Amino acid sequence: MSDTFYDLMRRQGISRRSFLKFCSLTAASLGLGEAGAQQIAKAMETKPRTPVIWIEGLECTCCSESFIRSAHPLVKDVVLSMLSLDYHMTLSAAAGEQLRANAHETIAKHKGNYILAVEGNPPLGEDGNYCIYYGKPFVDVLREYAKDAMAIVSWGSCASWGCVQAAKPNPTRATPVHKVITDKPIIKVPGCPPIAEVMTGVVTYILTFGRLPELDVQGRPKMFYGQRVHDKCYRRPHFDAGQFVERFDDEGARKGYCLYKVGCKGPTTYNACSATRWNEGLSFPIQSGHGCIGCSEDDFWDKGSFYDHLTTIRAPGLSNLGVEGTAERIGLTALGVAGAALAAHAAVSAVRQASSRGRNDRVSDVEK
Amino acid sequence: MKVNRVSGRVLQGPYEPVYVYEAPVRFWHWAMMLCMIVLGVTGYLIARPLPAIGGEATFSYFFANVRMIHFIAAMLFAVLFAVRLVWAIVGNRHARSIFLPPLWSFEWWSGLFHQAAYYLFLRKAPHHWVGHNPLAQLAMFVMFVLGTFVIVFTGLSLFSEQFGWGSGWMNAFGWVNVLLGGSQMVRTVHQLAMWWLALFALVHVYMVFREDIMSGETVISTMINGVRMFKREPR
């Protein structure tokens, strides 16, 4: 258990050359520069591995699926050993009681030193019985495992914000992790799923430096969620030029113009997609011709169409009747109604004025 | 002439001209109007961009220029509003009327209902007021002042986004983003506030012309020379 990462990597046949290459790539992806690479190498050679316990609540496993496709830091088997992933329901070879015992052993042995990675979120409705973990509500397991953790990583939009299972009307009362666990440092890594390299980057940072990366006010690592997809989008020059795709099958779409007018949510979404991209940097939604749907933003399911960067507004209490509209429709309707009302008011005023003037001619100034 | 200091109601004649709007307030009014027109037009173009311009993106910077004009006008608008807030403190008492409706004054409330009844044609004649009548004052506060606060803060938050979390701008205005629940909500509220102010402008312009024609006081010329004149001896 007290092996260092380096020992483990060497035992798996990773050459020192590959190891250093991995260190510099990781340092680069974290934006740490050359000195950072040496720091990472040193930490990996000397520090005992920090164990990670990875639990899954209400979720679809897309975070795990994304995670195992991380390309830099290295290939997947090294990534898995590097993490010292002591407990992961989907990825562990063991199963059942044996696996659970392993988790408890890690918790007992590394009290206050392990990282709890939470994928998905706990439903609180019906005393948490919508998600059962070893015969217990998941929320209880989450509290139990979180009690002695050093920090919690909220994987994906589920754990960070609530995502689809917390979308209105949220029948199971699915609740993001930070609203259940309030006494531990929580690092949110939103996205549906988060980018693989962002996930491994965040974990590597914590393991290497023994502290959380710098977070923004909402608890997301600044290095990956500091800027919007729009800010680093390669189609940004078309945005600045005023060249927009009007329809998904038009000339502009073929030329790769900006997708702003077909509702790309890049300008309202904080994520690293346009910088890191997906699948070993191959592409990302906007590059493949579809707008961003803002999957790393809070409540992205409840904000109306995926093809509009303004939120659909539902009249409170009238949403069951389907009364909803865009800001523009509401604004124009209000202006139209007000305009008509003022025109009518003006007409009545004119008539009154005329008739009162006529009366005033006969009777001087007796009003009220 | 006898005037109630709190509500601004003219209690007794003979009527004489009153200097209501000082020069900075008048300048501010027309500068704000210009800003609002520029902001409304460019803002609409940002929300609903024109059809695409052809050619290489290298040679066009049209949309960025539209945004730049919007930002410049917006900064002027925000600064003008901030200066106006200061002037509300240092200016004459009419300078603060739209920021502080005297909700504690009974006469003000009774004047409000009287004015509303007058606009609903239930009263033949309105009371006379030196500054805004209570209904106008309330509308100015709720529609213009509150609407402007919302549009300025959401606008500054949207502007800050280009600098990213952790920047000075975002530290100053990122709370709007957190408060409203994300950037998309900030945009939505910003646009709603724009329609709110457009509604205000429509009602404002109508009321100004109507009052100028039908009430006993000057209205439009007051915002030009600052002096409120009483056209006829009121009853």
Image (cartoon, coloured by chain):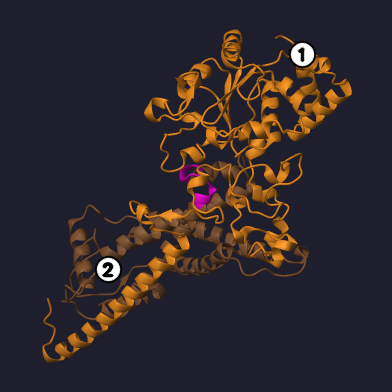
Chain colours: A orange, B brown
Q: Position of residue A202 (x, y in %)?
A: 67, 29
Name the amino acid type tagged 2. Answer: Val
Task: Please determine if labels 2 and 1 lie on a single subunit.
Answer: no
Q: What amino acid type is highlighted by mark number 1?
A: Thr
Q: Is residue B130 visible?
A: yes
Residue at figure coordinates x 37%, y 60% from the top left: B143
> A130 and A331: which one is in front?
A130
Distance, label 2 to label 1, CA atoms, is: 81 Å
Q: As rendered, which of B187 and B17 lies closer to the eye? A: B187
Subunit that carries the residue with mark 1:
A
SS at badge 1: helix
Q: Is residue A67 left or right of residue B39?
A: right
Q: Which residues are magenta?
A: B178-186
Question: Residue A70 occupies which quadrant of the picture?
Answer: top right
Q: Quadrant of residue B166?
A: top right
Asked if the stretch drawn in magenta spans residue B207, the answer is no
The residue identified by callout 1 is A46
Contact between labelled residues 1 and 2, with CB atoms less than 8 Å apart: no
> Residue tagged by mark 2?
B130
Q: Main secondary structure of the magenta part?
A: helix
Q: Quadrant of the C terminus of chain A?
A: bottom left
